[in-house]
């Protein structure tokens, strides 16, 4: 249907706005007197390295950690494939390669760090006394209990020997220029991929508070190390970061503005709610449903017809045994909340092309979706209860499938609201 086609085109415009080949060249640092070494982590790392090779005048060396199966043709920068979203031994190997790449540098050398979301799992190098299994169990528990990315990365940075600025500390006395593609609501650079090259303002005490808040059990030795500050990360003001620079080259707002611009060229009024909406996916869906229904029925806070956009990152508290992610869960909860409301269409998809344990970036909904599902014996409420949103949409052909996009500016939600036929009194 043409409404869904338009929403997918808006999603495509958001992806294009975060294409590293398009956004990275304007932020390249000056050439150094010595060597230029590249390190990178994240779902966009391969594409960022490709853009750097295309636009850098001079020799490059180094390594980038990328998701398994997401490599791209590169000339001189090595790619280390690692596991995502659950780190394994390949993630540890990638972390070691990154640390080795910046060892033994001089003041004349430059490190260009290419950092994007997903990097936390792709370079897992645990601190001494912390096992990979322990890190995995802690991260999994936080994810399942609905912790925010800010909270999860605060913990990660204090369990890691590479995150929280430790990679940049290893590069000292070389200068480090960090280029980031943000998948963090609010675009706080110190949280993107757990900030391997930026000083860490968070503390061991805050990491321990997160673990206690979500009731995550940890070994007594680890608890003691956090309590005493033995695992503290490098802080702002540390001399090893003097002269370093960083720049966010693409973020959620860029994608939303690109989508909005395309929608306006198609004649649609557009409203961006926020680029940093967080919270439980089902709760966010209820809020979005209330907003679009009010727009359609009352003309508030804006009148239909229009398109409403939002970005950010939802969370899912996993209680069932199904397959899915925050975007398909949001879409299913939104469909249930709208209950076939005429004239409302929506898309929710991750800009990395992945969504939790489902094989899709997200899903689309339309007014006939629930009726079609029930005619095929699907129970929307039961699927939501079991966190089984991906099979629900897959059975209906309503998933958004892209494969790896080689970028990551978080999630895009787009809702198309048509005007209802005029009624004398809707009260």
Image (cartoon, helix red, strand yellow):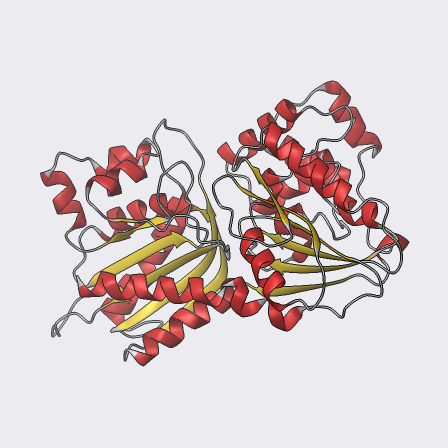
Image: 247 above or below 381: below
| Residue 273 location (% of width, % of height) | 43, 66
> How many marks on residues?
0
Residue pictured at 28% horizontal, 73% vertical: 299
Residue 138 horizontal side relative to residue 367, left or right: right
Q: Quadrant of residue 51?
A: bottom right
Q: Nearer the viewer, residue 30 or 132?
A: 30
| Residue 278 location (% of width, % of height) | 49, 52
Residue found at the far top of this picture: 220
| Residue 256 location (% of width, % of height) | 44, 67
| Residue 253 location (% of width, % of height) | 50, 67
Point out the image quarter for the N terminus: bottom left
Q: Quadrant of residue 210?
A: top right
Residue 293 horizontal side relative to residue 167, left or right: left
Residue pictured at 80% horizontal, 58% vertical: 35
Residue found at the far left of this picture: 375
Residue 208 horizontal side relative to residue 257, left or right: right
Residue pictured at 52% horizontal, 37% vertical: 84
Q: Quadrant of residue 142?
A: top right
Q: Nearer the viewer, residue 26 or 328?
A: 26
Point out the image quarter for the C terminus: bottom left
Residue pictured at 54% horizontal, 56% vertical: 47
Image: 54 above or below 189: below
């Amino acid at each position: 249907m043409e409404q869904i086609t338009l929403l997918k085109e808006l999603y495509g415009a958001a992806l294009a706005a975060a294409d590293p080949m398009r956004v990275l060249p304007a932020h390249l640092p000056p050439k150094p007197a010595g060597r230029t070494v590249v390190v990178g982590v994240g779902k966009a790392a391969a594409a960022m390295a490709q853009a750097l090779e295309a636009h850098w005048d001079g020799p490059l060396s180094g390594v980038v950690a990328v998701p398994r199966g997401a490599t791209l043709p590169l000339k001189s920068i090595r790619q280390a494939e690692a596991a995502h979203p659950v780190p394994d031994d390949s993630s540890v190997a990638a972390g070691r390669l990154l640390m080795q790449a910046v060892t033994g540098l001089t003041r004349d050398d430059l490190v260009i760090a290419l950092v994007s979301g997903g990097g936390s799992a792709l370079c897992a190098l645990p601190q001494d006394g912390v096992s990979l299994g322990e890190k995995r169990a802690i991260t999994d528990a936080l994810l399942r209990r609905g912790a925010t990315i800010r909270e999860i990365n605060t913990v990660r940075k204090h369990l890691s020997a590479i995150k929280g600025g430790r990679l940049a500390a290893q590069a000292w006395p070389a200068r480090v220029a960090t280029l980031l593609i943000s998948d963090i609501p609010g675009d706080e650079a110190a949280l993107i991929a757990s900030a391997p090259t930026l000083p860490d303002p968070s503390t061991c005490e805050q990491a321990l508070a997160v673990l206690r808040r979500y009731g995550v059990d940890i070994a007594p030795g680890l608890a003691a190390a956090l309590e005493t500050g033995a695992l503290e990360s490098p802080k702002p003001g540390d001399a090893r970061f003097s002269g370093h620079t960083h720049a966010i080259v693409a973020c959620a707002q860029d994608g939303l503005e690109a989508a909005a611009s395309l929608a306006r060229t198609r004649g649609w009024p557009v409203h961006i709610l926020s680029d940093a909406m967080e919270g439980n996916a089902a709760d966010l869906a209820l809020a979005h449903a209330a907003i679009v229904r009010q727009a359609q029925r009352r003309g508030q806070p804006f009148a239909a017809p229009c398109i409403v956009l939002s970005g950010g990152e939802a969370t899912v508290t996993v209680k069932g045994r199904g397959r899915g992610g925050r975007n398909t869960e949001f879409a299913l909860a939104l469909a249930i909340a709208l209950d076939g409301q005429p004239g409302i269409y929506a898309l929710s998809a991750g800009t990395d092309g992945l969504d939790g344990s489902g094989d899709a970036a997200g899903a689309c909904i339309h007014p006939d979706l629930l009726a079609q599902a029930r005619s095929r014996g699907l129970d929307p409420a039961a699927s939501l209860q079991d966190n089984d949103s991906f099979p629900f949409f897959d059975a209906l052909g309503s998933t958004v499938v892209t494969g790896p996009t080689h970028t990551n500016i978080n999630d895009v939600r787009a809702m198309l609201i048509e005007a209802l036929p005029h009624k004398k009194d809707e009260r």
